[in-house]
Amino acid sequence: MAILKMKKLRLIAVRSNKEELLRELIRHGCVEISELEGELHGTDIEALVHRESSDVASLKSRHSTLTHAIDLLDHYAPKKGKLLSAKPELDDRVLLDDTGLAGALKIAEGIESYDARIKRISAEESRQRGVIQSLQPWLDLDLPLGTEGTERCAVLLGTIPARTELGQVEASLEQIDAESELFCVHEEKKEHYVVFVCMREKLAEMQECLRSFGFSAASFAGVSTSAKECSAEARSELQSLASEKENCVQYIIGEAVRRDELKLAADRVSVQISLAEAGDKLYGTDSAVIMEGWYPEEREAELNEVFERFGCAWEALVPEEDEYPDVPVKLKNNKITNALNMVTNMYSLPAYGSLDPNPLMAPFFILFYGLMMADMGYGIIMILAAVIAMKKMKPRAGSLSFCQLLLYCGIATFIMGAITGGFFGDALVKIGGILGKPEGWGELPSLFTPLNDTVYVLVGSMALGLIHLNTGLAISFIKKIKHGQIADLGRGRALGHSRRYHPLRAEDRQCLRCPGRARHRRGNDLLRRLPRLQGHHRQARQPVRDSLQYRHRLVRRYSVLYPYHGSDARRLRHRDGVQHNRRDRQQLLALHTDLHHRSRPELRAEPSRLLCPRPASPVSGVLRQVL
């Protein structure tokens, strides 16, 4: 029930063992490889090594092909499985084996090609249906749709809006040429489908007249058959397309027996992607590779055996405090507190070197959840759902944490429901009233009820809240004592922020005695030098941020240091020319005391370890020999 201690790994391996070593590390699953670029920058080694590269993009493309093929199988041939079924378990050596991967990729590519053909067939079917629908009004016309007439006669096919009277159109055309004819082929609510015949020398005048009535010519260029024949050809084409589409679908359905094989291949490729991404973080030469990472201290023995077997040169370092932000965090909890891992992961993991919140948060989270629900019926449902899910699905990691949390919260809900006498609210009482039972039938015994004993519930909630807050304060108290921050306990400082100060210099003391704006200009200089005056944090934790926080507290506490004019005045929301002379002398005295009362030699800060050079690494010496 704590944050596992980690160690920093620096390793040099022979290039020929690179792939096998990475596979073995992935099989153990306890090493996180980190970037080396920052460590090598500005060193002599930087010019001698190069970054490793791999085909991550190609592997991701293969993985996408396999997963898409699996999705296509689920679409065309959905698999009927049990509602709650456990995922198959495989040995890690099977996942690291590449046998059969090429065949699975070929099958996936075939499924994708047939699916692409199905999409093209569907597009062609839509086009043929559109052709049939567009030919529907012209089925009664025996002429070829693409005809343009004879040498002396012109034929036009088109539409006229239904609001236009055809007799009026014919009368207008007869005035131009009495030999012209207008035939109506089909009528709809919106349009008249017509055929117009006239002498070719009168065609231009006739078209001008027809356009005045909203005539729109139909285009059937290249069609040498009638509408009936074209429609029959389109229907025949639809049948052949449907047959071909059915064959493609049957092929994909037939490949459904390879579904598990494709899933296994996809998992294998995902492992290869992990290997390639880890390999991209390495640096090396023609004969060796360099690796840096982190691993749990409790797994050191088994990793040492792996490194010895592959003939590696390595070192394991305990991380310094300035490296804590880069150290990966792994929690180790029991069955009770492991349930809260899901809640912790939803927000963020605790910082390395701090406390694991799960053991402290678990009892309050579960208890408060039970208080909110407080119903035996809901508790029983939650317990049954969690037990059945863990029994049938055999979840792991986050799913297991959720099921465990559901189980514990269900137990707490049932217990609080038994205390308050709730079973699906007052369902039993209502059922008794429907069945004609005497008054009071269905009421369960209870210590108190939230509706009738409101004051007790309120007092109990306040008491639990007080216990919750005091638990946090007690943890902070113990944490400060362990870190030797006893002086901060009475000052209300934040956890882990202990400060020691150096005395002011003579010119700094002089700036506080200057009158008027000169004092404030020198006060601003003093505030800017506070990071240097303040000294180093006792445990070298974020000294710059520490200094700035203290500077802001000084500005808020002592208005004598507020600027009278300029950008600082506007930033601090003080108008130009506003004087702050009230209690200036008292504040100057308080500021002088606050900055000087810790000036005794025993309270001065020791030099920060961050400024001390780290001793030469043995791996660096081995690397120089290899290079």
Image (tube, helix red, strand yellow):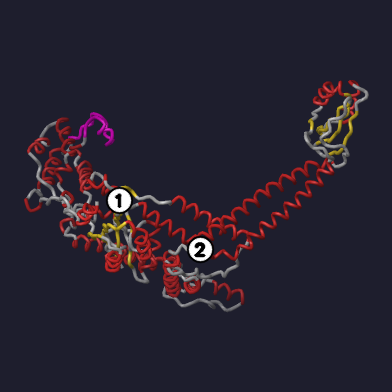
> What SS does tag 1 mark?
loop
Q: For the image shown, how many numbered marks are present on the structure?
A: 2
Percent x, y of residue 127:
72, 44
Magenta span contains residue 574: yes
The residue carrying pointer 2 sits among few (fewer than 14), some (14 to 19) or many (20 or more) residues within 10 Å by Cα, namely: few
> What SS does tag 2 mark?
loop
State the residue at coordinates (31%, 58%). Answer: 328
Q: Is residue 352 left or right of residue 210?
A: left
The residue carrying pointer 1 sits among few (fewer than 14), some (14 to 19) or many (20 or more) residues within 10 Å by Cα, namely: some
Q: Main secondary structure of the magenta part?
A: loop
Identified by mark 1, the residue type is Thr
Residue closest to the eye, 230 or 559 = 230
Percent x, y of residue 55:
43, 51
Q: Name the residue that disc number 1 marks.
A: 285
Residue closest to the eye, 303 or 317 = 303
State the residue at coordinates (28%, 35%). Answer: 571
On screen, residue 561 above or below 469: above
- Residue range (magenta): 563-581
- Residue 280 visible? The answer is yes
State the residue at coordinates (84%, 44%). Answer: 229
Residue closest to the eye, 1 or 584 = 1
Residue 455 quadrant: bottom left
Percent x, y of residue 567:
26, 31
Q: Is residue 439 left or right of residue 354?
A: right
Along the polypeptide, which appears first: circle 1 or circle 2? 2
Percent x, y of residue 436:
61, 77
On screen, residue 395 above or below 191: below
